[in-house]
């Protein structure tokens, strides 16, 4: 198969960088690069600087590990949030998905993944110990397990359940309105919102 010949090494470099992004093929990458060339220089510089600042300046909340501009994220710092309820999610996208439902007013805890031996991800690679510490240090009354309904998600749920077994915290899980195998960001907002509102005791949901 023949490769596109570029008259500019700079253009080819830009196409290579764009095509390295998820879901972006080389044709789309070329279209994006050519689009930027047509834009005012100030706009393109602003675009480029926003990407650089994203990588260099963004941080993660020391409390919940959500993405943040400050040491403590806006959700954790919000006095109107329910500080006694913590929703455990796999990643930052899941926080956004649940927030979009407008059905949850508690806090979050982002694990940074789920237990997956096939991918070499074990409990120590995730923010599980920091969750256990939060439950011990803060006035948390309920932990909601809102992980994807996959084998890996269930394995992670059971591991967290065992780690928190000695505490008095109530442990619930989102209702199984979300089909087995689904990830939260693929669920529609109404279904996800209902699954949060209609959450059930963790142990009873697996009997």
Image: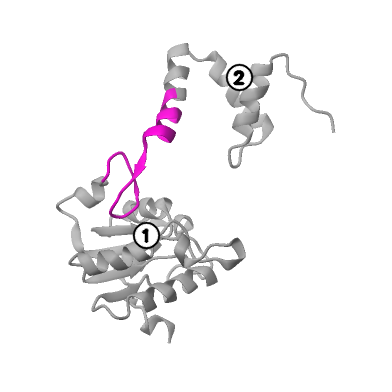
Is residue 52 magenta-colored? yes
Question: Marks 1 and 2: in contact by CB < 8 Å?
Answer: no
Q: Secondary structure at mark 1?
A: helix
Is residue 95 magenta-colored? no
x and y percentages locating residue 144 in the rendered image = 32, 68
Please, is residue 121 above or below residue 63 in the view?
Answer: below
Position of the N terminus by quadrant? top right
Q: Residue at x 21, y 65 (%)?
A: 137
Please, is residue 63 above or below residue 67 in the view?
Answer: below
Q: Which residue is mark 2?
A: 34
* Label placed on residue 73: none
Per the rendered image, the range of residues in magenta is 49-71
Q: Which residue is mark 1?
A: 190
x and y percentages locating residue 141 in the rendered image = 21, 71
Mark nearer the N terminus (2 vs 1):
2
Is 65 positioned to the left or the right of 23 in the image? left
The residues bearing labels 2 and 1 have C-alpha atoms spaced at a distance of 39 Å
**The one of 103 and 81 positioned closer to us in this rendering:** 81
């Amino acid at each position: 198969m023949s490769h596109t010949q570029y008259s500019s090494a700079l253009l080819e470099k830009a196409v290579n960088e764009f095509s390295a992004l998820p879901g972006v093929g080389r044709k789309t990458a070329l279209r994006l690069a050519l689009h930027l060339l047509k834009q005012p220089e100030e706009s393109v510089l602003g675009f480029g600087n926003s990407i650089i600042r994203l990588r260099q300046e963004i941080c993660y909340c020391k409390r919940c590990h959500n993405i943040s501009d400050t040491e403590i994220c806006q959700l954790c710092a919000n006095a109107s949030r329910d500080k006694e309820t913590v929703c455990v999610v796999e990643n930052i996208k899941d926080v956004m998905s649940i927030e979009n439902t407008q059905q949850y007013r508690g806090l979050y805890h982002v694990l940074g993944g789920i237990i997956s031996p096939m991918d070499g991800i074990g409990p120590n690679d995730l923010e599980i110990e920091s969750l256990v510490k939060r439950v011990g240090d803060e006035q948390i009354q309920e932990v909601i397990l809102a992980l994807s309904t996959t084998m890996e998600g269930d394995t992670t749920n059971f591991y967290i359940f065992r780690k928190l077994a000695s505490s008095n915290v109530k442990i619930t899980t989102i209702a199984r309105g979300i089909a087995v195998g689904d990830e939260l960001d693929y669920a529609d907002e109404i279904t996800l919102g209902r699954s949060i509102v209609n959450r059930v005791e963790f142990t009873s949901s697996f009997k």
